[in-house]
Image (cartoon, grey):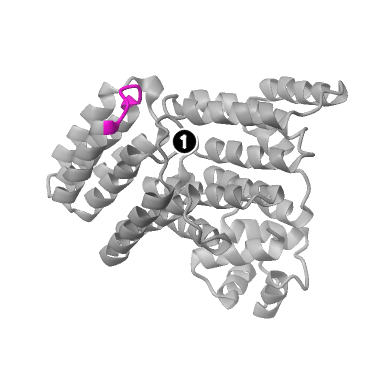
Amino acid sequence: MGIGELIRDLRNAQGWSQGELAKRLTQSAPGYNMSRETVSRWENGRNKPGPFWLGHLALVLEAPLAVLETALKRRTFLTDVAATAIAPLVASDLIEHGFASRLGGLAPDADDWEGKLASYGTQYMSMGAADIQRRLSGELVVIQQQLDDPRLWSVAARLMTLYAKTFPGSDGSKAVNWYLMAAQAADRSGDQETRVWVRGRASIALGYEGASLDVANMFADQALAISAKPSLGLLNSIMGKAHAAAIRGDEATALAMAEEGRRIFDSAGSYEQTSDYAVPYWRMNVFLSLLFARLGQEKRALEVQEASLKELPASLPRFATHLDMHKGLMIARAGNRKGGHAFAKAALDKLPPEKHSLTLRMLLDEIKE
């Protein structure tokens, strides 16, 4: 994605016209005047913003400056961001390891990285956010030295997507920043399936969390534009849009998206049970459980919760906690907010703290509000 496309997508995610963006840029830079025509030239690729306006675009569009600079430069971009995401001493050791591997003539092995990727997809389902974040930080710092093979851009994109999920989508920067970079890495890979999956996973993650809904819709729309072929990425995109609609009170759209999601699941659903890259029957029903709870459709929510529990592996207690917390949300939606919050908190407290995810904590906040 180039700088013009990124500015346009972020502007559309805010619901602004080119004129509105120009107005806000003018307000952010007293003494300077930004015109709609200049914004149009940026978005159409006829001109590029300089360092001064890049900084103000980052401020106004609520996008990290590193993301905009990356789109402008189109170079390898993981080093600085990965290094700043972890403790300086740890980062120093990891970067040293990455360079030593490269300088020592050790050729990157795409199959080995694919194996690591599969392992992290499984581990994510049961590990806590802090643990998976620490491990993935190391992998990202190393793989950024080995991005000669398009397959490794695909691996990096999927690793970054998992890494993004260890930050709360509601913070408005870190999670979205990593999802944006993951999408760029996926584009570098040239692999259509990866491009759709990364965007779909970002969409369902943000939609399920109830965070950055405009960005969730943006990623979903991008995935749909890339390919309409039934896939897990497309399924995640549709369900991300369904949750965004439900949170905004658009019941008709949410239900229509849910039915479309069921149709895609019938073609593309997977039967793997323990990977973040899979959407088996029980996990599809977890998506639907929260959706129906948000819509206040108690009967339908209970039906999919029961169906999910019949197939949910005992080795994944975190997802049983999700279902219990959905019940807490239903109690709150029925008018007993205090009781719903107490029910959900009790469910979360039963889960060992090291198994907690940021998504569960954000769901508790949603029930409390």
Q: Quadrant of the N terminus?
A: bottom right
Residue 35 shown in magenta: no
> Which quadrant would residue 19 be assigned to in this image?
bottom right
Disc 1 element: loop
Left or right of 175? Residue 107 is right
- Give residue 34's position: percent from left, percent from top: 68, 74
Q: Is residue 79 above or below residue 366?
A: above
Residue identified by numbered label 1: 276
Left or right of 323? Residue 97 is right
**Which residue ends up furthest to the front in the rendered image?**
267
Neighbour tally class for label 1: few under 14, some 14-19, many 20 plus, Cα within 10 Å: some
Residue 249 seen by the camera: no
- Give residue 188's position: percent from left, percent from top: 71, 49
Q: Is residue 348 above or below residue 290?
A: above
Helix, strand or loop for the magenta stretch, by majority? loop
In magenta, the rendered stretch is: 311-317
Residue 314 shown in magenta: yes
Q: Nearer the viewer, residue 111 or 292?
A: 111
Q: Nearer the viewer, residue 159 or 175?
A: 159
Residue 2 seen by the camera: yes
